[in-house]
Image: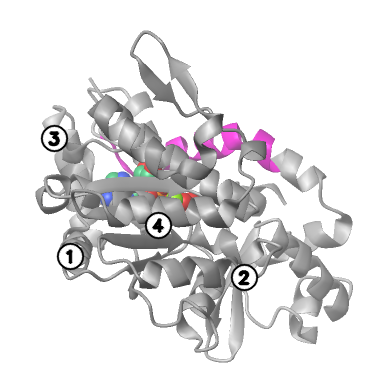
Amino acid sequence: MENPFYITGIIPEPYFCDREKETAWMVQTLKNKAHILLTSPRRMGKTQLIRHVFEQPAIKDNCYTFYTDIYPTTSLHELVLFLSKEIYSVLVPKGKAALDKFLTAIRSLAGSFGYDPIASTPIFDVKLGDIRTPELTLEEIFNYLEHADKPCVFAIDEFQQIAYYPKKNVEATLRTHIQKMSNCMFIYAGSNRLILENMFNSSAQPFYNSAEQLYLDCISKDVYTGFAEEQFTKAGRTIAPEATSHTYDLFEGHTYYVHNVLHNAFAYIDSDKVIDIEDIDKTLSDILEEKGRTFASVMNQLNYQQKETLVAIAKEGKATSVTSVAFVKKHTLKSPSSVQYAIKTLLEKQLLTYHNEGRSKVYRVSDRFMEMWICRTY
Ligand SMILES: Nc1ncnc2c1ncn2[C@@H]1O[C@H](COP(=O)(O)OP(=O)(O)OP(=O)(O)O)[C@@H](O)[C@H]1O
Ligand SMILES: [Mg+2]
């Protein structure tokens, strides 16, 4: 029996939970020819939502859809490579004519294609070094999308990366092109809300006001638990409603973590047994034990101050006023300035995240499993 709780890869439609309102809104927004900025905390479900939107008939039957995750990129060269690779891979199943059309359009890379003699099609095996004029290639890519025979939707995931590129005009270059396009809508997604909202909400920035915004929150408790119980029932199994409710509450509904616990409960609890709260707690302990090795090695790479700061924040859950004397005292830390210093590194390493509540910053350990593991271990 297939495990209905997917924790990796693309979720097949029957196992995709809810997001009905968000999906309808995104489809409608794209139909209205507006771009979308999609943000959420990490592992809430942005990428899955984009994939789901692409599966909707209104999009699937009428548009070309593209998706690229630019997290690894650090320059316009790489961005251009990622965009063109994605277009190429979408066109491969459409055959020679479609491929030829694209490869002819990106003339600046013409000398860099290979050739597949059996299928008699060009192969896109462009290396980074082949991209000598990224601005020109970018223009050619956008030109191609603008003149495609169907509307295009291009999702660029982890879009905040652009802000880290050393060359500062990339945002402006992209925006100049995109502004002129009417056949291609973009979905910009990412979890670094601070950077993304600054890119789109401050009037000095090129992307200012250029996208409709959606902040993705948890799936509501009744919808998620209903979905989860139904998945067990369909598989001929039973989970006690208190157990699904308990799992949801452990992580305040944070999608990936709730889903991962139910995935493992489905996989490892005896299929004749009614799954109860104890089974869930046991499943969670096993997950933490298994992931503990990785967490331990992450902790090993931190210095003492960073470690004790991370532990203090984990124990606090949502930590405010972390550089106050009261916080330092409560957790017997060294000093407010050492905490401040440690937090900077922990944020850079993405072990911590924060959001603003009024004027104060609320810090939290990014990975909810790691937070729990730290609380149990230290
Ligand atoms: N609608 C959904 N139905 C079922 N499971 C979901 C859904 N959304 C998210 N998940 C679960 O949460 C996991 C994380 O989702 P996803 O990768 O889309 O999050 P994300 O917000 O893109 O995360 P990141 O910021 O790390 O890229 C999925 O692999 C899946 O296990
Ligand atoms: Mg993602």
Callout 4 amino acid: His
Gap in Å between the C-alphas at discs 4 and 2?
Answer: 36 Å
Gap in Å between the C-alphas at discs 3 and 2?
Answer: 54 Å
Comparing labels 4 and 3, the label whose residue is closer to the camera: 4
Callout 3 amino acid: Thr
Circles 2 and 1 in contact, beta carbons < 8 Å: no
Where does the magenta region start and end? 275-295
Taking the magenta stretch, the answer to whether it contains residue 222 is: no
Gap in Å between the C-alphas at discs 4 and 1?
Answer: 18 Å
Question: Residue tagged by mark 1?
Answer: 21
* Mark nearer the N terminus (4 vs 2): 2
| Along the viewing direction, whichever of 173 and 143 lies nearer the viewer | 143
Residue 169: image tag? 2
Comparing labels 4 and 1, the label whose residue is closer to the camera: 1
Question: Residue tagged by mark 4?
Answer: 254
Gap in Å between the C-alphas at discs 4 and 3?
Answer: 23 Å
- Badge 4 density bin: few <14, some 14–19, many ≥20, Cα 10 Å: many
Question: Residue tagged by mark 3?
Answer: 233
| Along the viewing direction, whichever of 9 and 180 lies nearer the viewer | 180
Comparing labels 4 and 2, the label whose residue is closer to the camera: 2
Q: Position of residue 350 (x, y in %)?
A: 65, 57
- Badge 2 density bin: few <14, some 14–19, many ≥20, Cα 10 Å: some
